[in-house]
């Protein structure tokens, strides 16, 4: 098991490795014992596959489980309210401990519930996807609004993150693809050598557990270092949003959950690389193609529709377009882009995608 530390306002540990749940009781004895009740908010699919495994490590405690829809569907006002209703019906209090058990969407909505129930109760993130190496760390919680992704939420750090990588073995290929997009995002904003390694084009399924864990650790370390500097995103935390301005627009246009978050981020990064005039754009497009990222999706969406969403992005104000770009790999910066340039770049990207897909 590896340990990473996030020195946020309320510091906490991230434990990562195969079977880390085995150490849950020993590591967090006080937190678990002090709780008047433990509530697991679990992704429905994850619960089918892995709930018994998790419960086997929580035997001595009073545990209730609330299942929520799998994936992005859960990030709705309805699910948020249902979680609160469940906590109230169960007689939960400020001494209740919430466990968020699932991928990024589960962590986001469960974290938001934890941050708002009786104005805040402790919670632990138990991520079950590759994508969640990113979302479970850093304390961003949210649900979606029809007009924009993650528009309703808080910054609220978990007490700990226990990342049992044994659970990654049951992920479907599209979830692996989605998660690996956030891994390569961390490489783009931090480290050329790591990026070269990822762009080697090995099949994701050929990565050994050790290699996968090493990638996840690197990603978490990049994220933790940024969150420590700028927990509430007044400056450099925005760099973690590389590729997300367009990604969130695609997700909003398609309907949440119709395209995975990571797949949308992969397309958004292609756009940001073009705007950055990054030398690895073509290589990256081939990487996307060979791993099955849905590049052709961009040819199906009118730019004006995407523009409307991008103008509402959280990094923008007064309808400007603000992107995270790269001076070079590992050197992100923010840039305001004029609408005309944004559209021309989009058309340019479409023609490059056309060449790659021939
Ligand atoms: O932690 C952050 O900060 C990020 O931007 C990480 C993103 O990868 C993640 O998808 C995040 O939830 C997006 O947040 P948002 O503020 O752009 O909605």
Image (tube, helix red, strand yellow):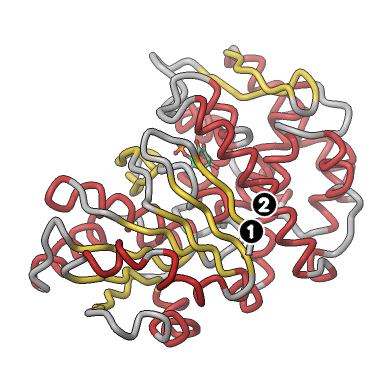
SS type, badge 2: helix
In the image, residue 316 sits, relative to residue 167, either above or below, namely: above
Q: Are marks 1 and 2 in contact (CB under 8 Å)?
A: yes
341 over 170 or under it: above or below: above
Q: Quadrant of residue 328?
A: top right
Image coords of residue 113 (percent x, y)? 25, 54
Residue at 36% x, 46% y is 141
Q: Nearer the viewer, mark 1 or mark 2?
A: 1
- Looking at the image, is 319 positioned above or below residue 158? above
Kind of element beneath mark 1: strand
Residue drawn 41% across and 57% down? 107
Q: Going 67% across and 64% down the picture, which residue do you hit?
A: 176
Q: Position of residue 15 (x, y in %)?
A: 55, 59
Tell me, yes or no, if residue 120 can be seen here.
Answer: yes
Which residue position is annotated with label 2?
217
Relative height, residue 352 to residue 79 (above, below): above
């Amino acid at each position: 098991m590896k340990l990473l530390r996030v020195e946020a306002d309320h510091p906490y540990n991230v434990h990562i490795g195969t079977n880390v749940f085995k150490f849950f009781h020993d590591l967090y004895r006080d937190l678990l014992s002090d709780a008047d009740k433990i509530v697991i908010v679990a992704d429905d699919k994850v619960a089918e596959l892995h709930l018994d495994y998790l419960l086997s490590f929580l035997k001595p405690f009073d545990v209730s489980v609330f299942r929520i829809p799998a994936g992005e569907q859960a990030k709705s006002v309805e699910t948020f309210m249902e979680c609160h209703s469940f906590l109230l019906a169960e007689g939960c209090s400020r001494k209740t401990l919430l466990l968020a058990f699932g991928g990024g969407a589960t962590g986001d909505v469960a974290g938001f519930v934890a941050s708002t129930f009786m104005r805040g109760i402790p919670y632990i993130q138990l991520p079950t996807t590759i994508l969640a190496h990113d979302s479970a760390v850093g304390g961003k919680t949210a649900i979606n609004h029809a007009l924009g992704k993650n528009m309703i939420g808080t910054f609220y750090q978990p007490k700990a993150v226990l990342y049992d990588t044994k659970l990654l073995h049951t992920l479907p290929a599209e979830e692996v693809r989605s998660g690996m997009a956030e891994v390569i995002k961390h490489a783009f904003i931090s480290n050329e050598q790591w990026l070269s390694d990822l762009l080697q084009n090995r099949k994701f399924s050929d990565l050994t557990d050790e290699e996968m864990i090493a990638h996840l650790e690197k990603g978490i370390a990049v994220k933790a270092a940024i969150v420590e500097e700028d927990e509430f995103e007044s400056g450099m935390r925005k760099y973690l949003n590389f590729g997300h301005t367009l990604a969130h627009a695609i997700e909003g246009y398609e309907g949440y959950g119709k395209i995975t978050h990571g797949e949308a981020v992969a397309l958004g990064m292609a756009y940001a690389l073009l705007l950055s005039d990054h030398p690895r754009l073509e290589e990256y497009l081939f990487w996307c193609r060979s791993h099955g990222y849905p590049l052709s999706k961009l040819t199906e969406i009118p730019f004006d529709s995407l523009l409307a969403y991008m103008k509402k992005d959280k990094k923008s104000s007064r309808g400007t377009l603000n992107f995270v770009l790269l001076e070079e790999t590992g050197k992100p910066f923010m840039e305001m882009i004029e609408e005309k340039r944004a559209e021309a770049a989009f058309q340019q990207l479409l023609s490059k995608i056309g060449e790659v897909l021939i």
